[in-house]
Image (spheres, rainbow, N blue to C red):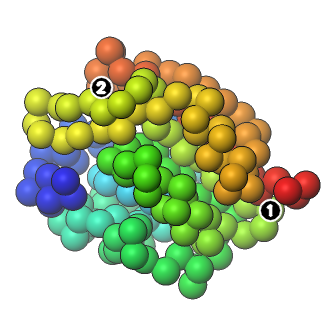
Amino acid sequence: MNNFYEINNQQYFDSTVKIDSSSFLAPFTDMLKLNSKVLDIGCGSGRDLLWFKKQGFDPTGFEYSPSLASLARKYSSCPVIEGDFFSYNFSIHTFDALCCIGSLVHVGAARFESVLKSICNALCLEGILFITLKEGSGLSHADDGRVFVLWSKRDLENIFSRVGLKALNFTRQVSKLRKNETWLGFVLRFDSGS
């Protein structure tokens, strides 16, 4: 699956780089202080890295595909870590905020919770996480061969609770690329009472 983004890096870059991020990132960044350190996991084209930088934050990207990572660095002039979130040691970093815009859409339900826990190791205690996933049930198969895992709000909330996260904000938005898809967005923080 990950090879898709390496093989089709320029096509993916071109199809996503011009999307206006403000509508789905504002609920997240409204909760951040200026100069907050943000890790954009699955940064893709670097579109959101550049947006974060223009808003006064200190962004770093994280990307599996070396070719996409290179394009993201060039486009955003931000550092981009190359790695696989299934095996990367996120605990060596400390960020004020983590951003997962669609980056976990290919992670199956059996591995999702452990991947989320691992990623959260990079989050400072008072930090916040923004995550978006596709709404539905089962799997969705795209014409280009990609397989997407679909989620219900309730199932995600159960996982977040087990990981020790509580929702500060929730949104449901129609995809900017495909009008038949809906994205669930959560701004989360570690639950101090858990």
Q: Which residue is mark 1?
A: 126
Q: Is residue 25 left or right of residue 146?
A: right
Q: Is residue 184 left or right of residue 12?
A: right
Q: Is residue 97 left or right of residue 14?
A: right
Q: Which residue is mark 2?
A: 177
Residue 179, placed above or below residue 19: above
In the picture as drawn, the residue positioned furthest to the right comes out as 193
Residue 15, placed above or below residue 78: above
Residue 77, placed above or below residue 159: below
Q: Residue at x 80, y 62 (%)?
A: 126
> Which residue occupies the foreground of this view, 180 or 116?
116
> Which residue occupies the foreground of this view, 105 or 128?
105
Q: Residue 49's x, y, as percent?
A: 45, 56
Mark 1 or 2 closer to N-term? Answer: 1
Image quadrant containing the C terminus: bottom right
Q: Residue at x 39, y 68 (%)?
A: 86
Q: Residue 36's x, y, as percent?
A: 68, 63
Say few, some or many: other residues with alpha carbon within 10 Å of mark 1 (under 14 / 14 to 19 / 20 or more).
Answer: few
Gap between marks 1 and 2 measured at Cα? 33 Å
Residue 37 is at least partly visible in this image:
no
> Which residue occupies the foreground of this view, 106 or 169?
106
Q: Residue at x 22, y 70 (%)?
A: 66
Say few, some or many: other residues with alpha carbon within 10 Å of mark 2 (under 14 / 14 to 19 / 20 or more).
Answer: few
Identify residue type, mark 1.
Answer: Glu
